[in-house]
Amino acid sequence: MLTHMSSSDPLAVSHGTTAPSRWRSDGRADGIFRWLVAGAATLVLVVLGAAAAAMLWGGRLTFETFGWHFLFSSEWDAVNKQFGAVVPIYGTLVSSLIAMLIAVPVSFGIALFLTEVAPYWLRTPIAAAVELLAGIPSIIYGMWGLFMFVPFMAARVLPWVNQNLGGVPGVGPLFQGPPLGIGMLTAGIVLGIMVIPFISSVMRDVFRAVPASLKESAYALGSTSWEVVWNVVLPYTRSAVVGGIFLGLGRALGETMAVTFVLGNSHQLTASLLMPGNSIAATIANEFTEADSDIYLSSLIALGFLLFIVTFVVLAIARIMLHKLAGKEGNT
Amino acid sequence: MHSLSRHLKNTAVAGAVALGMIAGLAQAATTITGAGSTFVYPILSKWSADYDKKTGSKVNYQSIGSGGGIAQIKAATVHFGASDKPMTPEELSQAGLTQFPVVIGGVVPVVNIPGVEAGKLKLTGPVLADIFLGKITKWNDPAITALNPDIKLDDSLITVVHRSDGSGTTFNWVNYLSKVSDEWKTKVGEGTSVQWPAGVGGKGNEGVAAYVKQIKHSIGYVELAYALQNKMAYTQVKNRDGKFIEPSLASFQAAAASADWSNAKDFYLVITDAPGAKSWPIAASVFVLMYKEPKDAAGTKAALDFFKWSLEHGQAQAKALDYVPLPDALVKQIEAHWKAEIK
């Protein structure tokens, strides 16, 4: 390789540069390049750290005043200046969990259909439609949720849920309550619809990247489409698929406008998914403009910091689970 | 070379002329800046558009909420702040500020009960407080049916709808509930946002209006304009003199006129639960906050001129937008207050 390069590089000679000096300039350029890309990557870490630090600093009054109590209190009383984060944290986690329960299987179905099952002429239009869904502003989802979906839930879905699931032992309390249409379940479903395009387009792209030879071998051995996807495509793309799910999860945790419209914005802790609740992002968006005392404002910023922590913890848990899963597979 | 230098010279002259013109414009027309209450935004922008046409002075008003308005005027980044909640005289003197009302509005309860039309249902302050406390949970509660013998009410559960964001509307609403219910006063209290014992929260007047329209058997509270524009079923409320009153510009005005402004230091007066046979019990006023000894004296003077013009000549515009203009006697009082307080 080296001899080939030096012998067939007339340019180096014609410009009067000797081989050692060419190596030196290459080395310099390489160094600069390394610093450049390292800088780009470091920038992310710096921004991340700075954002977390800024929120921690803004919320210091709250953490000083309430201490750990802030994490375990369900109080949110601007009049008596008592604040706690349990209700918004619970609402954020539960609405995102419902969203993922809906979005992950549906997205998997969409991606599977578009890569394995659908006729070729149908694939591009459906893929384009899914990506268009991702371009709709979240306020539109919120308005659609409030004006179209909430009445539908209140009139058709929730009475049925109440009657058929409300009495089931164990999960019954989750499904009892007046059919307002506004609440955790509705918010979770709207969130689920919102994150489907993110997860499904990532899944579709990575499914398409699976070498055709692998799939064709499996088909040649007599596998069904399902067996090919489950035993060949999914294991091959697993970490990318999980990355796509994280992307959707991150968006669900932080979504603000659409949730505010359909969640009910009530600082009360209830077991029922049909009752209104609150989320971290919705609380901040609702109350920031009129936060008229220092501790109130500080508590809202502290909530922002907690959203940061919650997202981090959720993603870390997901990553650990993935690691365990991979370990188990290695053993079998 | 020669032509280039001439060109440069021409450009310089043109630039100087342009700069001079800009400076001249700036002198002729000051821009008045303000921030605060969203409730007052529609009428302030109407007034400022008309005032601009008349005098060439522009008013740049940011409707960022009353809390934000107070913060901005305290930081002296604006010429005036606007708040639905008056500051106490102590708070004002601490910050070197003074305040005066500019316009009157009102908060009305709205219900969604099939078959019940606007202005039909009768409620009292204590009953409203008990509903919002979650103590009265059904529409056929004896406390409600006793007030409404002619209306058939069934045992549907009441859904309470309140504001999810902090707001002056909420402040006036809970201020009224605190005045008429001791239990509300001790358990919940008053403020621009409170810890609601019951119900769901909608963002903004429009959010509450949307929830009440969608949830059957619900009750909420909005500004009158929202109730009228959305054709919602507002209720009558019993006032301090024991009369059931319908919300209207006339009953808001009666409340504003009967309030004892002359004895209120710095106009610190919330006109809920006002006396008078024709007074609406949940009327509200919007206050403007200004410095007594402003650093930017010219800007403050311009802002005062704007409010003087608005209070004296802006009544028709206010009525057209469902606001109540201040009574004449109060306007005179405010103008005297300016002379005495603002340097």
Image (cartoon, coloured by chain):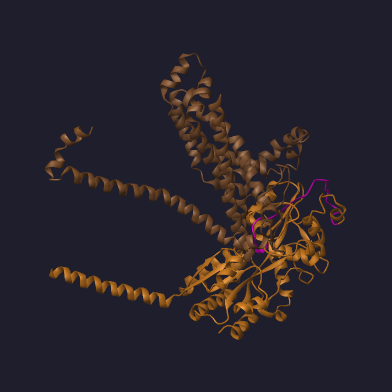
Q: In this view, does A229 lie to the left or right of B163?
A: left
Q: In this view, does B163 lie above or below A20?
A: below
Q: Which residue is drawn at 49% across and 52% down?
A: A48
Q: Tell me residue A95's x, y (percent).
A: 63, 43
Q: In which quarter of the image is the N terminus of chain A?
A: top left
Please tell me which residue lies in front, A2 or A119: A2
- The structure residue drawn at horizontal position 67% and vertical position 78%, both measured from the top left corner, is B90
Q: Which residue lies furthest to the front in this view?
A: A20
Q: Within the magenta stretch, is there residue A121?
A: no
Considering the image in quadrants, where does the C terminus of chain A appear?
top right
| Residue B261, position as x, y percentages in the image | 70, 78
Q: Viewed as shown, does residue A171 lie left or right of A187?
A: right
Q: Position of residue B55 (x, y in %)?
A: 47, 75
- Magenta span of residues: B147-169
Residue B167 inside the magenta-drawn segment:
yes
Q: Position of residue B225 (x, y in %)?
A: 65, 60
Which of the two residues, B154 or B249, is positioned nearer the viewer here? B154
Task: Chain B: give its colour.
Answer: orange
**Chain A shade:** brown
Residue A197 shows up from this direction? no
